[in-house]
């Protein structure tokens, strides 16, 4: 069967289109592969350098949390090595709330155990209710006695978002 010149012309044009598409795909792969490699390496370097959050920087998953505040330079502060907090001060009305919580704890100034949670737990002493947030922290109120106090952004080391309620209890530290 003889080949018509028109059918070869169509074959050549189709072949030319196929070659162009292959060339475009090849060029696209030559760009995408290095870009993906650079992004992966850059992400790994950023994670290693601590720029990207790691699992350890997430808020704790425990329902009930404990810190050990103490008085330093006239105000209540606390340390938490997990988050690099050293002498993190309570300010804006919270020291006065703590004074009420520790009124019956001898030598509380040297340290006490503060248990807190966003859910009620057995024998909690006081409930703080969220009032409002600002650019940095959150204001909570205590009903009895009526008081307000500001909790700084360190709260977000323990919670992903400010809880609507915080339940607290103060106990003496165990004797060593």
Image (tube, rainbow, N blue to C red):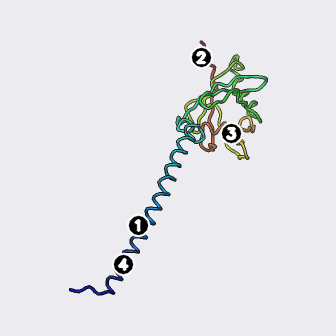
Between 151 and 157, the residue placed more toward the observer is: 157
Please report the residue visible at 66 percent of the width from the left and 26 percent of the height from the top: 79
3 in relation to 82, above or below: below
**Crowding near pointer 2: few (<14 within 10 Å), some, many (20+)?**
few
CA neighbours of label 3 inside 10 A, class few (<14), some (14 to 19), many (20+): few
Residue 61 coordinates in the image, percent (x, y): 52, 37
- The circle drawn on residue 41 is none
Of the image marks 2 and 4, the number of the one nearer the N terminus: 4
Numbered circle sitting on residue 22 = 1
Check disc 4 and report the residue beneath it: 12
SS at mark 2 in the image: loop
Horizontal placement of 38 versus 17: left or right? right
Residue 85 sits in quarter: top right
Considering only vertical position in the picture, is 110 above or below 36? above
**How far is the residue under mark 2 from the one under mark 4?**
89 Å
Residue 153's tag is 3
State the image quarter where residue 172 is shown.
top right
Cβ–Cβ below 8 Å for labels 4 and 3?
no
Nearer the N terminus, badge 1 or badge 3? Answer: 1
Q: Which residue is labeled 2 in the image?
A: 174
Q: Quadrant of the N terminus?
A: bottom left
User: Which residue lies most toward the right here?
Assistant: 74
How far from the left and from the top, in percent, is residue 113?
62, 24
Q: Earlier in the sequence, mark 4 or mark 1?
A: 4
- Label 2 and label 3: CA atoms lie apart by 29 Å
Decide if residue 93 is in sight here.
Answer: yes
Q: Position of residue 37 (x, y in %)?
A: 49, 49
């Amino acid at each position: 069967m003889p080949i018509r010149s028109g059918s070869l012309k169509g074959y050549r044009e189709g072949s030319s289109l196929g070659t162009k598409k292959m060339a475009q795909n090849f060029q696209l792969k030559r760009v995408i592969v290095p870009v993906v490699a650079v992004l992966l390496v850059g992400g790994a370097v950023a994670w290693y350098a601590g720029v990207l959050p790691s699992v350890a920087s997430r808020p704790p998953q425990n329902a009930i949390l404990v810190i050990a505040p103490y008085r330093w330079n006239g105000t209540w502060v606390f340390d938490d090595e997990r988050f690099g907090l050293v002498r993190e001060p309570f300010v804006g009305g919270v020291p006065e709330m703590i004074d009420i919580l520790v009124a019956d704890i001898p030598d509380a100034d040297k340290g006490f155990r503060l248990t807190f949670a966003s859910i009620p737990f057995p024998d909690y002493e006081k409930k703080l209710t969220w009032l409002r947030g600002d650019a940095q922290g959150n204001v909570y109120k205590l009903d009895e006695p009526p008081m307000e106090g500001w909790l700084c952004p360190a709260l977000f080391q323990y919670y992903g978002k400010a809880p609507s309620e915080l339940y607290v209890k103060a106990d003496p530290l165990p004797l060593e």
